[in-house]
Image (spheres, rainbow, N blue to C red):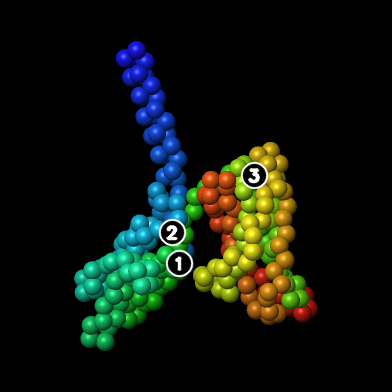
Amino acid sequence: MKRIACVLTIITNLIFISFSHVAAQCTIEIRGDFIYDLSTTETSRTEAAAWQVFDLISDYCGTDCSVCLTIADPPEFTSSSSCVRTSSFVWAVSCGINACLNGYWSNYNSFMGHDYSGTWDVVCPTLVELELFEATPRAGSVIVLWSTASEADNAGFNIYRSTSKYGDYIQINPDLIPAEGSPTEGASYEYVDDDVRNRKAYWYKLEDIDVNGVSTMHGPISATPRLLH
């Protein structure tokens, strides 16, 4: 009986290790003036993930940041701005680094003459194989189209829109768009966004969410509606 219990303990530990490894497959995607993919155990934009972004931006920009970090306030998470940040203003020279929970990051140094910024997000792989994701402009509307080759454990989709590529994206569909595919068969989808103005560019992201709440973002893509095409 002791031998059986020992074997069961080993199997249980192996299963635990296996699941722990799967949970660590998420990636922090940093985009903008810096482009970098960083492994993480976080599954969404948390304070811990923001600290990872802050540390990477601090290292990535090299000497410019090291000088700033020497004279700046100690980095900390500020609840008022929901950012991991540090900043300094000495002799009319300002510098700072920010990594915020809304998915925005920045790194500026007035003395060195740079002002870098961009977006970041935590992406965890889902079992949706996307074949097509495009936005077709019309007069007073944009038609967002996407299709999948297969969908395993997919709950549905959300569409997010912004007026700039690296701006804040806001969900525009009121309810989750139900999944129609299966593990062996894909599906085609269409969403008409008529809350737009002609001659103004719009950017879109597609989010697929599985039955466990894990999501993956796709895009962005853009379209500019016009009266005549």
Classify mark 2: helix, strand or loop.
loop
Please name the residue that numbered disc 2 is placed on: 45
In space, the residues marked 1 and 2 are separated at their CA atoms by 8 Å
Image coordinates of residue 189 in percent, x first then y, are: 72, 55
In space, the residues marked 3 and 2 are separated at their CA atoms by 25 Å
Identify the residue shown where x is 69% and y is 38%: 184
Q: Quadrant of residue 175?
A: bottom right
Image coordinates of residue 95 in percent, x first then y, are: 30, 77
Identify the residue shown where x is 40% and y is 33%: 16
Q: Residue furthest bottom?
A: 92
Residue 161 is at least partly visible in this image: yes
Image coordinates of residue 173 in percent, x first then y, are: 64, 64
N-terminal of the two: label 1 or label 2?
2
Classify mark 1: helix, strand or loop.
loop
Q: Quadrant of residue 94?
A: bottom left
Please name the residue that numbered disc 3 is placed on: 151
The reply, left or right, for residue 190 in relation to residue 109 is: right
N-terminal of the two: label 3 or label 2?
2
Image coordinates of residue 18 in percent, x first then y, are: 42, 34
Q: Answer yes or no: do the residues labelled 1 and 2 have beta carbons within 8 Å? A: yes
